[in-house]
Image (cartoon, rainbow, N blue to C red):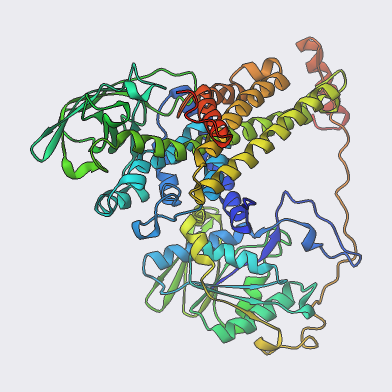
């Protein structure tokens, strides 16, 4: 398996980095302070074709390989985690349609998503069903050629601004745990759909995280993804792939914090010398840099596994997200430490990066859930049958 | 036809060869930033339908093809690179001779250039090319427009604008007033790889090394770094009155007050 970035990847990275340095980084502090979604940057990303990177060319996308997609997310997240979520969630919301959608469904929606005319969101989590996906209560009842969706979702990234949400609801409450759910495409201008409340968050503050209410939202059968009862499988197939974006985001956040800390250490003088000349600082920078590099390489390995549609791709993407998320948290915390008191105030970007990093340990499966997935695979490989739950 | 030059990035560390030429291989290279305004102007003319096609022309070492590829990623249709070992160390005159000869072959309605290059800053090439080709020069345009067989520029002056127009074909140069150059889009980068690019030698444009006086009429006699400024004197940790006295004394000693 090869996952070394190519010349094309380097060129792509240079292009996205220039854009992120010049246009995204200068907006990051303001986006964080105002907690407002950066519509201007969404337009910019659309114009530069960066919202279409996961969509096939026949739908107007550029269909980059997964290493290239990771590079795009990484470079934007290096400047601003919130803005990188615009790219990440466009794919997350569309992934259920990619893995289970019919050709007709893809043709109907992908051109508008690839161009960035529409935004997508993914609605699985509920107030009492986070890691425990089987605990979902939202109902979808068949009514002629439609389903009526009723219930609530919580913590839905971009739920309040998306034009299309992929939603998971119970179609058969009496079926076994994994057969209860079905997946649907819901256009958010459908009567009965509302996003009444946004969360107040520690980080990624410009990215609206919404509570969604469905009051008998009428969804045509033509918008069901896959067969009835396949919702759980669709959700898992989606998350096994989408986690890769979070690993890339974490690598980007960590790289941004590392770069800032290095630049600061080279400038800041104490005791009559640059703090970069102090071994105590050098050792921190070395640990940060090697950690980021290790997380990046594992993320690219996971990207190659997704490109190859490897049977154990969940092992790779969960490992990458686990390592990259923890690395981002540690590296951003250390960046604050390198800056000392200045790191703790919002005059410098590292405290924001530290707050942003935390979410990568939580969403699209907590780090504990990633460990369950990795452990299951490790035990299976060793011939242990049906390990754990 | 936009004429572009590949230059070392202003942030790149510059090294010189033994004969005082810039070591181009050692420095990160970019499209001359002032040429990016010419590219932007040309692409806007193409988008508005005022011109049919946009091509790029560059004279430089082989790696200048990268600059042409980057320009093609921003837009436009094709590119031509004139490269020849005999052109090493070409000065503004040699450059103008080569570009003029290449433009004679390409015969565009407009040869558009940035107002100067970021590394040499001679601003000589547009005028020299126009003179060599015997066509009008519209220089330092804040905007270029084309109507029928006429090209027109708006040139910023101390008290307003001059409007200058001339019949096609023309050589024109534009300033940063034309508006921010666009970023290459992802599709632009991908499609640039498939756009045609030709490479010409000196002979291909009908010139010989002898004719160019060994490429340069000028010679660099010395290249050195600017002298270091004396360290900044700081007035710190004193009362405001004391600080004012010291600063005024400092200025007075230099006859500045």
Place of residue A62 in the rendered image (x, y in percent of width and height, measured from the top left): 44, 56
Considering only vertical position in the picture, is A145 above or below B199?
above
Left or right relative to A86: residue A180 = left
Residue at 79% x, 80% y is B86
Extreme residue in the top direction: B239
Left or right relative to A24: residue A176 = left
Quarter of the C terminus of chain B within the rendering = top right
Is residue A43 visible from the viewing direction of this image? yes
Place of residue A260 in the rendered image (x, y in percent of width and height, measured from the top left): 67, 31
What is the count of numbered marks? 0
Is residue A348 visible from the viewing direction of this image? no
Task: Tell me which corner region of the image, top left, top right, bottom left or bottom right, holds residue B214.
Answer: bottom right
Considering only vertical position in the picture, is A280 above or below B135?
above
Place of residue A41 in the rendered image (x, y in percent of width and height, measured from the top left): 44, 40
Task: Tell me which corner region of the image, top left, top right, bottom left or bottom right, holds residue B95.
Answer: bottom right
Left or right relative to A270: residue A313 = left
Extreme residue in the left direction: A144
Considering only vertical position in the picture, is B210 above or below A23?
below
Place of residue B175 in the rendered image (x, y in percent of width and height, measured from the top left): 56, 59
Residue at 66% x, 26% y is A331
Residue at 64% x, 30% y is A257
Residue at 13% x, 33% y is A142
Considering only vertical position in the picture, is A368 above or below B135?
above
Q: Nearer the viewer, residue A154 or A112?
A: A154
Q: Nearer the viewer, residue B157 or A340?
A: A340
Left or right relative to A150: residue A165 = right
């Amino acid at each position: 398996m090869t996952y070394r970035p190519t010349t094309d990847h380097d060129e792509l990275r240079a292009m996205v980095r220039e854009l992120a340095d010049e246009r995204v980084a200068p907006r990051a502090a303001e986006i964080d302070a105002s907690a407002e979604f950066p519509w201007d940057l969404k337009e910019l990303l659309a114009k530069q074709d960066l919202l279409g990177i996961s969509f096939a060319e026949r739908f107007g996308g550029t269909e980059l390989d997964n290493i290239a997609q990771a590079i795009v997310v990484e470079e934007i997240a290096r400047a601003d985690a919130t803005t990188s979520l615009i790219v990440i969630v466009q794919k997350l919301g569309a992934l259920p349609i990619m893995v289970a959608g019919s050709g007709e469904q893809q043709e109907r929606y992908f051109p508008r998503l690839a161009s960035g005319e529409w935004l997508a969101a993914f609605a699985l989590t509920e107030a009492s069903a986070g890691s425990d996906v089987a605990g979902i209560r939202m109902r979808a009842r068949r009514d002629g050629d439609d389903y009526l969706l009723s219930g609530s979702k919580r913590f839905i990234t971009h739920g309040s601004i998306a034009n299309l949400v992929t939603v998971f609801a119970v179609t058969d409450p009496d079926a076994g745990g994994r057969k209860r759910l079905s997946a649907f495409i819901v256009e958010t201008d459908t009567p009965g759909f509302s996003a009444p409340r946004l969360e107040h968050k520690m980080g990624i503050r410009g990215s609206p995280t919404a509570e969604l209410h469905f009051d008998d939202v009428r969804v045509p059968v033509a918008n069901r993804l896959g067969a009835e009862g396949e919702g759980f499988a669709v959700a898992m197939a989606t998350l096994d792939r989408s986690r890769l974006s979070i690993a890339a985001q974490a690598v980007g956040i960590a790289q941004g914090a590392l770069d800032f800390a290095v630049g600061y250490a080279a400038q800041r003088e104490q005791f009559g010398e640059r703090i970069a000349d102090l071994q105590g600082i050098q050792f921190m920078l070395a640990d940060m840099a090697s950690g980021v590099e290790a997380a990046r390489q594992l993320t690219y390995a996971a990207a190659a596994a997704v490109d190859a549609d490897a049977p154990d791709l969940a092992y790779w993407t969960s490992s990458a997200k686990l390592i990259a998320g923890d690395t981002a948290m540690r590296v951003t915390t250390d960046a604050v430490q390198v800056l000392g008191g200045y790191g703790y105030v919002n005059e410098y970007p590292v405290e924001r990066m530290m707050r942003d990093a935390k979410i990568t340990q939580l969403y699209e499966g907590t780090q504990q859930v990633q460990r369950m997935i990795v452990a299951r695979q490790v035990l299976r490989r060793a011939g242990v049958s049906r390990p754990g739950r | 036809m936009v004429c572009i030059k590949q230059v070392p990035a202003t942030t790149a560390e510059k090294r010189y060869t033994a004969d005082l030429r810039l070591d181009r291989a050692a420095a990160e290279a970019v499209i001359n930033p002032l040429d990016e305004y010419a590219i932007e102007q040309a692409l806007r003319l193409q988008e508005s339908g005022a011109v049919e096609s946009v091509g790029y022309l560059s004279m430089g070492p082989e790696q200048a093809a990268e600059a042409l590829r980057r320009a093609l990623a921003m837009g436009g249709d094709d590119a031509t690179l004139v490269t020849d070992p005999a052109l090493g160390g070409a000065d503004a005159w040699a450059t103008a001779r080569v570009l003029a000869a290449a433009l004679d072959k390409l015969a565009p309605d407009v040869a558009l250039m940035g107002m100067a290059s970021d590394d040499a800053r001679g601003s000589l090439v547009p005028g020299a090319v126009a003179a060599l080709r015997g066509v009008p020069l519209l220089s330092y345009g804040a905007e270029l427009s084309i109507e029928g067989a006429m090209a027109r520029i708006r040139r910023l002056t101390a008290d307003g604008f001059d409007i200058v127009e001339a019949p096609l074909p023309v050589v024109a140069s534009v300033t940063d007033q034309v508006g921010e150059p666009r970023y290459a889009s992802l599709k632009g980068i991908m499609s640039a790889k498939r756009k045609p690019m030709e490479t010409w030698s000196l002979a291909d444009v009908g010139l010989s090394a002898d004719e160019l006086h060994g490429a340069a009429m000028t010679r660099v006699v010395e290249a050195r770094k600017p002298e270091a400024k004396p360290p900044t004197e700081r007035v710190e940790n004193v009362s405001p009155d004391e600080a004012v006295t010291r600063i005024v004394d400092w200025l007075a000693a230099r006859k500045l007050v």
